[in-house]
Amino acid sequence: MYNLTDQQIEFIRNDISARGVAMVSLQHDLLDHVCCVVEHGLEPDGDFEAFYSSSIRTFFKDELREIEQETITLLTFKHYYFMKKLMLFTGTVSTVALTAGLIFKFMHWPGAAILIFLGVILLSLVFLPLLFTLKVREKQNTKDKVIIGIGTLAGICISFSVLFKIMHWPFANMLGIIALGITVFIFLPFYFLSGIRNPETKVNTIVSSVLILYACSLLLVLIRSPKASMEVFAAETESVYRSERIFKEQEKLTSILVKSELPSDGKNILQACEELKTYLVQCETGIPEIRDSESTLITDGSAGEYLSRSPEIEKKLVALNSEIGRYNQSLSAKQQKVEGLSKLDDRRVSQAINDLIQAQMVILQNQSTIALNN
């Protein structure tokens, strides 16, 4: 066993301080630990400086002051390891859930929406904020903290824009444009200029920047421009307006040809469909009916979101589906059944209104069929 002299102990103390360890208590702890390692590992006639030089390198990856930085982090951030484990767990679960949800959606299996929603929520509201918190604690430079913050914000916006797009929720395109703007025009310049100046990170920065641009290009495919969105909304509004006009003409023609009144269940279905149409148009446009296809636009609003706002409307939809079931059972072989509207809350407003109009037109067509047969 080797016995250190006072000069050698002082040499170790000075070297630890010179390597960037400023905390006195940590200097003493490292000094005791290093001395123990040297005394137990060095032969009595061994080379102290060579053995010390090789031993001290085992305490760090790049610099010895890393120990002080980690110690400060642990002292000021007591739940560091718990948050790190939670970050890794939520990252794994969100990735698995999102991947499974996309596979389920591709195969049209039930539960796809829940898995995708769970994956994006965990990734955006748990994993990314935890990653931001931990990374900021590790960085000393304010510029690095700002870059991490902008990158986290861009990641959250991208995740939510993809979720809104997959789920056909409103404002998906707006979120996508915001996400791309933050990523391409704010995060990427900061990240590229900061990393390319450092020779050690220059290559990784260039490769990462190219991959980020490539990912943004793929995301751009999912996003409609404002002009294209207006054209799509105008086309959908025109489709609804045209269907409504056809229904009104058929209603007038049926009232002329058919002298008998509609059966009570048919009347109830027509009335309920009309009330639901009025409600959806009112929620989407602010007026009870579409007067023309130019001054009024139906956007990509979700019928389910509007229907869920009113418990009374939800009950009316349930009653309507029950009424349709009874009506279909009373039809003859020559009459056409009314398609159920149980999936109305999964559609956009324009699709839902067209479904309601089609149900009304089938009722009128069946009444005309009865009149012709008689």
Image: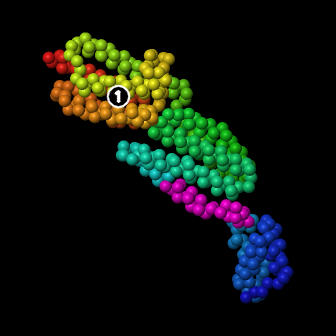
Q: Label 1: few (<14), some or many (≥20) within 10 Å?
A: many
Camera-nearest residue between 256 and 183: 256
Span colored in magenta:
68-93
At 63% from the left edge and 46% from the top edge, which residue is drawn?
A: 151
Q: Is residue 232 magenta?
A: no
Q: Is residue 122 above or below residue 30?
A: above
Residue ranking furthest to the front: 312
At 70% from the left edge and 47% from the top edge, which residue is drawn?
A: 146
Q: Is residue 96 left or right of residue 352?
A: right
Q: Is residue 313 above or below residue 3?
A: above
Check disc 1 and report the residue beneath it.
355
Q: Quadrant of the N terminus?
A: bottom right
- x, y percent for residue 217: 56, 38
At 16% from the left edge and 28% from the top edge, which residue is drawn?
A: 333
Label 1 element class: helix
Q: Is residue 179 above or below residue 349?
A: below
